């Protein structure tokens, strides 16, 4: 049996729950390791100073900006790769892959160039205080230098997932994450390189992770990366960006909301910035479980929707939502019952603990609602209903959070910073629920022709 036939059999005949876990668990492990290295960064940099930890919190926003571009190209291409492979069109799949990959690398080089030229004003705009400016510039330089490799890695990672090869994706990302943790220990704790060591460790791990993913992609994927497959028609670029636009919104608004949060924290000192950075990174660690399972659902939804196996898509949606909600809720319990101890793990400063304890507890309540929003958003993105997916992506960090925090902060101070994001999570989950139920009850059964217009997009 050739690769295409084996992949078709796996995507259409494997029990849905089992298939989603097969694809989702490697992705979840990858995201867990990536978030563990983010937490390790927070821990190791916390041993340097509050200013250094505040700097990494600020530069987390820059990483979100880079990831926003990466996921737009990666998930945009991946959605069409799954569709093309379902149609047994490997050449078209290669066109989407190569176009997204090389476009991402070029934009990464542009971001690197302009970011380094305007590094000082850039990190101040992201929310760096004067005290943390030197550390922010040092760490930011390394993040920018590794930007093309990070974008390339995320594009390859997403296409690997959509081709049903999440295990290979996991190998590349997990290796990079573990190397980053090891590098932090060596450069910061042993060599005493401070913030420069944290940035250097991140850059080295990104380059190595990219190299591993590239080798695995070339060896095992059906789609190809040869430059001859780069699209000549603008239509292909538009299709990639349209399908990936919800990802750009999700990640881009995360960057914007983090920037707003950091700037509003400035009057409350670097301890407040450091505390909220810890809370956000811990909540992202928990959410990666729900998001990882959701990303396992994406290729299943894209492939089966294309060939009109709608019942598999609906079963997958229910399984993903229930499974990810339970997993996130179980992990969130720790943030509810021992929030002060969790903050203490990353910084023993009393001011940081005081600023982060209540915020951790509030966040742990709010994130329980996020899997509903994530599953629904990924469903509509994977089935190429970009307008609905884009609206849902706007909710959590945009339409709800930004107006809410800008209105509440002048009225109730730091409490607004603590509660605005959890309230946004809850609101986004509630608003997304009708869209989820609509798909389940209104989508036709297998083989129906009533969705022909959507299928021919």
Image (cartoon, rainbow, N blue to C red):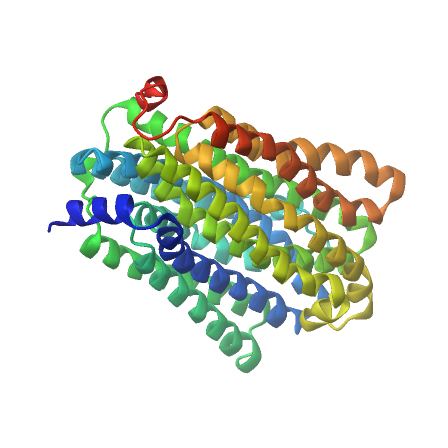
Residue drawn at the location 55% of the way across and 48% of the way down: 62
Place of residue 110 in the rendered image (x, y in percent of width and height, measured from the top left) = 42, 40
| Image side of residue 447 versus residue 20, left or right | left
Relative vertical location of residue 107 with respect to residue 151 in this rendering, above or below:
above
Question: Residue 329's image quarter?
Answer: bottom right
Image-based side of 446 in relation to 406, left or right:
left
Q: Residue 371: x and y, percent? A: 57, 46
In the picture as drawn, the residue positioned furthest to the left comes out as 1
Nearer to me, 120 or 9: 9
Tell me, yes or no, if residue 199 can be seen here: yes
Quadrant of the rendering where the C terminus is positioned = top left
Q: Is residue 326 above or below residue 11?
A: below
Q: How many marks?
A: 0
**Residue sticking out furthest to the bottom:** 190
| Residue 184 position in % (x across, y down) | 52, 72
259 or 386, nearer to the observer: 386
- Residue 10 vs residue 84, the one in the foreground: 10
Eyeballing the image, is 307 above or below 185?
Answer: above
């Amino acid at each position: 049996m050739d690769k295409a036939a084996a992949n078709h059999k796996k995507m259409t005949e494997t029990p849905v729950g089992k298939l989603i876990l097969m694809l989702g668990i490697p992705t979840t492990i990858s995201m867990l390791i990536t978030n563990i290295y983010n937490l390790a960064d927070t821990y190791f940099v916390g041993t340097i100073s509050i200013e250094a930890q505040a700097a990494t919190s600020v530069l987390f926003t820059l990483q979100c900006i880079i990831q926003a571009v990466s996921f737009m190209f990666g998930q945009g291409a991946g959605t069409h790769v799954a569709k093309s492979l379902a149609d047994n069109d490997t050449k078209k799949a290669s066109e989407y892959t190569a176009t997204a990959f090389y476009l991402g690398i070029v934009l990464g080089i542009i971001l690197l160039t302009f970011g380094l030229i305007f590094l000082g004003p850039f990190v101040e705009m992201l929310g760096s205080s004067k005290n943390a400016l030197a550390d922010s510039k040092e760490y930011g330089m390394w993040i920018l230098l590794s930007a093309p490799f990070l974008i390339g890695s995320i594009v390859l990672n997403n296409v690997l997932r959509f081709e049903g090869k999440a295990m290979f994706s996991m190998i590349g990302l997990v290796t990079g994450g573990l190397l980053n943790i090891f590098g932090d220990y060596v450069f910061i704790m042993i060599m005493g390189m401070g913030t420069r060591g944290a940035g250097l460790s991140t850059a080295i791990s990104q380059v190595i992770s990219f190299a591993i993913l590239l080798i695995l992609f070339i060896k095992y994927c059906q789609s190809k990366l040869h430059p001859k497959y780069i699209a000549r028609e603008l239509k292909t670029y538009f299709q990639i960006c349209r399908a990936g636009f919800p990802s750009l919104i999700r990640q881009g608004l995360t960057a914007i909301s983090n920037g707003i949060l950091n700037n509003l924290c400035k009057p409350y000192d670097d301890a407040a910035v450091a505390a909220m950075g810890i809370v956000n990174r811990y909540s992202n660690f928990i959410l990666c479980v729900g998001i990882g399972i959701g990303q396992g659902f994406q290729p299943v939804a894209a492939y089966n929707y294309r060939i009109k196996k709608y019942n598999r898509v609906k079963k997958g949606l229910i399984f993903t939502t229930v499974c990810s909600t339970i997993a996130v809720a179980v992990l969130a319990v720790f943030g509810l019952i021992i929030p002060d101890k969790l903050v203490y793990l990353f910084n023993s400063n009393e001011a940081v603990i005081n600023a982060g304890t209540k915020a951790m507890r509030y966040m742990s309540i709010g994130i329980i609602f996020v899997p509903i929003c994530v599953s629904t958003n990924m469903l509509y993105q994977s089935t190429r209903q970009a307008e609905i997916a884009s609206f849902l992506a706007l909710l959590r960090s945009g339409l709800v959070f930004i107006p809410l925090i800008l209105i509440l902060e002048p009225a109730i101070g730091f409490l607004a910073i603590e509660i605005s994001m959890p309230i946004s999570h809850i609101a986004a989950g509630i608003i997304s629920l009708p869209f989820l139920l609509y798909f389940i009850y209104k989508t036709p059964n297998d083989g129906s022709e009533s969705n022909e217009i959507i299928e021919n997009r």
